[in-house]
Amino acid sequence: ELGMSSLAITDHGAMFGAIAFSRSCEKVGIKPIIGMEAYLARQDRRIHDQTEKQPFHLLLLARDMTGYKNLLRLASMAQLEGFYRFPRVDKEILAQYSEGLICTSGCLAAEIPRLINEGREDLARQTIGWYQDVFGKENFFLELQHHDIPELMTVNRWLYDNQGYARVPLLATNDTHYVRFEDFDAHDTLLCIQTSALKSEQKRMRMTDPSYHLRSPEEMWALFGDVPEALHNTLLVAEMCHVDLKTKGYHLPTFPVPTGFDAESYLRHLAESGLIWRYGEQGADSMRERLNYELGVIHNMGFDTYFLIVWDLCQFARHADIWWNVRGSAAGSLIAYCLGITSIDPVSNGLIFERFLNPGRVSMPDIDMDFPDNRRSEMIEYAMNKYGADKVAGIITFGTLKARAAIKDVGRVLAYPLPEVNRLTALIPQIPSKPVSIADCLGGDPEKAVPALKAEYESNPEIQRLLDTAITVEGVARNAGTHAAGVIIADKPLVEYLPLHRPIGDTKLSQVTQFPMETCESIGLLKVDFLGLATLTIMRKACELIERYHNTKFSMDNIPYRPDPNDPEQSRRVSMLFDLIGRGDTTGVFQLESSGMKRMLVEMKPRTFEHIVAAIALYRPGPLQFIPTYIKRMQGQEQVEYLHPKLEPILRETYGICVYQEQIQQIGAELFGYSLGDADMMRRAVSKKKVKDLQEHKARFVNNGPQNGITAEVSEKIFDTIEYFAAYGFNKSHSADYAILTCQTAYLKAHYPEEYYTALLSVQRHSIDDVALFTADCRANGIPILPPDVNASDVDFTIEQTTDPVYRGRRGIRYGLSAVKNAGEKAIDLIVQARGDQPFSDLGDFCRRVNLKEVGKRTIESLAKVGAFDRLADRDEVLMGIERLMSYSGDYHRSREIGQFSLFGSETVTETLTLPKAPPEKQSDNRTRLRWEKELVGLSVSSHPLNAILPMLQDLPHFSYSDTLHREVDEWNGKPVTVAGLVGATRTLTTKNGDEMATFTLEDLTGNITCVLFPKSWKAARELLLRLGQEEGLAVVRGRVDMSRGDVQIIVDNVTNKVDRSLAVDDVRVSQNHQGYDAPAQNREEPPQELNTPVPVMIDDSDIGEDGQPNALFNRIGSSPTDPRRPATEVRLAPETVDNVMDYMDEIEEHNPPLLLTITFRRTHDPDLDRRKLQRVRRQLNEYPGQDHYRVRMIMPDGREVILDYPDSTTHYEGDVENFLLSQFHPDDIEVTALPKSRG
């Protein structure tokens, strides 16, 4: 538009966008010039003090490829060696890497202009001479700029008057910070966002005038027409620069092969050996054709070395006894299977190589590897040692300003009322996997339009200004991070290919790329994904326990997941894993933990590995609609039909439904003349639904079908079916690979529940929510959970043989001390090591054997509150006497250190430890102790209020959480029941008519049951339930079991806290299965209340649907005042078999996953102020516990970053919490991302 033939990029201190900028320029015929506005240290890049707080600026441009590579080095060294507040170079490395670079005197912040403004003219002239000597006279220019800054005019005049000195050419530039003149306001808004300022503030950072855009040639001539040589020299500089960033080939690291081999022949050698290993001599012959085909494709595409590198990584893992798993399409490769990279046979499982590596689409293979999360760092260290630390780097990622954050930022900058801003942001759909833009919501995309927001925009000029401004800043990069898994490995030091960045966040890597992942791959660099998977850690630990207790050794290769036709006993044991999955007992089973998945499995009753593969592929937003058909056909309730008999061999295993991407490839290849590679290209094209591609492939189907005995009409129907399924099809290789872990974890849980749960709890011990979930599941399955005990517990959870008759000799799981919140792991190690094989005899013995100064008061207090000292002393005595314990232990260990005991020839002469009895008014009651346990370990581990009424209920039939885990629960559906338990978190919903209803949890001895109150029930019971929820009070609930959504829920008719022997037999049903609770019963003193509501709940005519059932088209979700000590639970509305409610609630669950809040905390130079602020923030977050997690990214004054993780803490990110954080932090410093629902 401006008629320019060249354009330069000169970002401050970095080269993040160099490649993307270059490619964008070339697409439109503009010559790209690559540069950087460097930060120049005033003295030395290695000095970190006050003199270096404001480095100089310096403009550098790459004249040729030598200059570009030197620019890469300078940008990298600035980050890795010179970072102090800014990434800085210094004159030492400028002189070392000046070849091929063009340099200018720079802007007002550069060294020479500053000297001029300071009146140090002689030094300015000397400095000009230094730059000429370093870069060459022809490569150094005096830069003239024109903006509304008085000092700039002084500098320009001096430079013009002194250009004759050393004959330095002039260069006219503009300090461009945005593209168009009209972007000034958007840029000014960004400045306010970045500096936490209001636009209305007078004394804030701002550009002096709206001239910092990309000025046109006419504008530049108007400003510098009296210095024409300065303008002509811009063309000269552009002509001088010739940097070609087009890349060819790959830069794979050199892999050392044995003498006599090259990469191709060594790969063939390994593959041939592996073929015999996998299939035997006879079986190998039938596979050799496919082996040769894959080897040929791999070699022709240049990836022999890639496979050797991945094979070597797996070999190291195998020898180091590190378990691994390969996810994604790599499972379709026979070579990968023969090399031992993957563990599933691609031939017998119908997996296709071309889905993994397509000769028609040349791109680097992508083998994503999962490793135990506690050993991932070993794999990275091996790669660094093998290939060189300078050739290995993490990959940078950029977080961008999304729609909601943009509105909040702009709203704050424009001083809009916070409630009004929150109301507008709430209208933006929050779907982490598919973020929507503000423009989409305003009608840019009709499918994503939000009518309410559009109406506000069109009717309110202030809101229009707010949203228009937010649109201009939406999508801007807001922060940088490190890719969770990706690692780049190259054949040469990476600085020869790209600029490097200092490590970001918690990473073992010494450097990170400045280019994002897509750019790194596009310039031929190898990316290897080292993913951390907790499931592998759990499996490995479980198998170690199984070997210890059962003398059965499992590895990642031999845990059964398929029946062996030659081994009836093994087949019987495998069938038990499918029994477990079919009854929905899948808490802790990989990929099967969500409530929706459990519902599907209960209906499906899978019996084979293939059923699990399909279940994983089907349970996603797109293909969910096909699950009922799949189940009916699988169970013989619906006939399987095919459009043509030739489809049967391809679709038979999925009952005529196209579930996998590979099936589409097979249809194209076997019925319509495509190669498997071309069929994969067809699948990709059709899934994008581009009209031209659709017409092209449809014609090919119609033309080729008759040649294979399929009429044109049927061919067209088959294509239409493929078009429909192409967007939903799932990668079968990935699903099959994950299905192995699914079945293996189910096998371990089915046959070795104590070992599996112990491993599961140990690995997840830092998550109170997970520990509470898994221990409840243990109890529901009859496994005793034994409380933490300094004389019995280890660091982790352990298996322990019970002696109490109530447990009937069953093994229990003892709480690990490190699972207690606030108990430091190092401190727990000290306690366990000091105890050894000899229990502590009393508190004095404990204090003498454990140096409590090293353990810390907080750890002792937390252990005491959960009863870990109960065998040694009363909790209240320990808590009241903590200072005495600390001083006693301190005195003892100090005396020991100075040798005081040697005077007596013994260490037994010590002061007796006595603790005072707690007075009655300071003694904690059972409710207080229960609250402590809930806060510190997630649930009650010693006593439960239900014990108080067990004697009254021993002879009653029971319905409890544990009943929900068994098939027989179907018998309860629709029947009236009464259940007793503690009232947990209450959540409110609003119907379309504005009526409020609610759900709440009721915790019995074995877990939580969801209870639902429709509007009139809720109105009657509201006051009592809110009080009981705040007090964690005991309630008895009458209602009926509802399974309309698969989960067991109680539709509530009556709530009471009146519990006595006058209850009728049919009134209360509680589980007698109370293992693990052996503390004395507690008595309650509060007066009983009882609230009865009519049965059934009366519903207004407007609430009745066509089927006569209550409608529930809810329009918003809110939270009622609940006890902040208890985490909010998942909303599970139990409609009275109303399908639309079920669908709506499924959508709620899908769109509201748990969140991770990353709060950027920028340190000041006042530690006390910072400490108080951090404590205030954590206290506020912890007062609203829920399913969301948080961490703090602390930016130190010197620029270092520290991640403070709080795995045991949760919050509920909405309403008060969100407003509080926005009052404490800039919106840019609050990053919200979705967490996966299932643990992996």
Image (cartoon, helix red, strand yellow):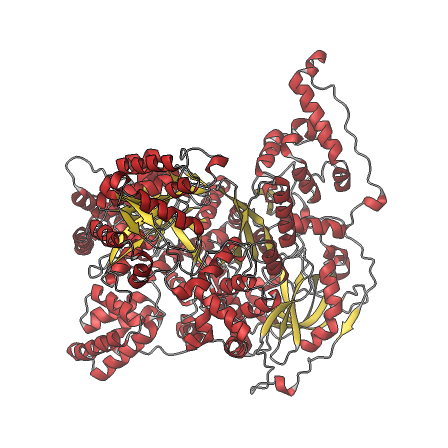
Tell whether 349 sits left or right of 1205: left
- Furthest residue in direction right, as rendered: 920
Return the residue nearer the eye: 308 or 598: 308
Q: Quadrant of the N terminus?
A: bottom left
Q: Quadrant of residue 793?
A: top right
Q: Residue at x 26, y 58 (%)?
A: 23
Tell me: residue 1108, above or below residue 291. below
Tell whether 225 sits left or right of 1023: left
Q: Can I make out residue 1024 in this image?
A: yes
Residue 1090: x and y in percent read: 79, 70
Q: Residue at x 67, y 66 (%)?
A: 1120
Q: Residue at x 39, y 74 (%)?
A: 633
Return the residue nearer the eye: 249 or 1095: 249
Tell me: residue 751, above or below residue 717. above
Residue 772: x and y in percent read: 60, 53
Tell whether 861 sits left or right of 98: right
Tell me: residue 957, above or below residue 776. below
Q: Quadrant of residue 679?
A: bottom left
Residue 1124: x and y in percent read: 68, 57
Number of numbered discs visible in the structure rendering: 0
Residue 175: x and y in percent read: 37, 54
Return the residue nearer the eye: 858 or 820: 858
Return the residue nearer the eye: 102 or 1090: 102
Q: Can I make out residue 529 in this image?
A: no
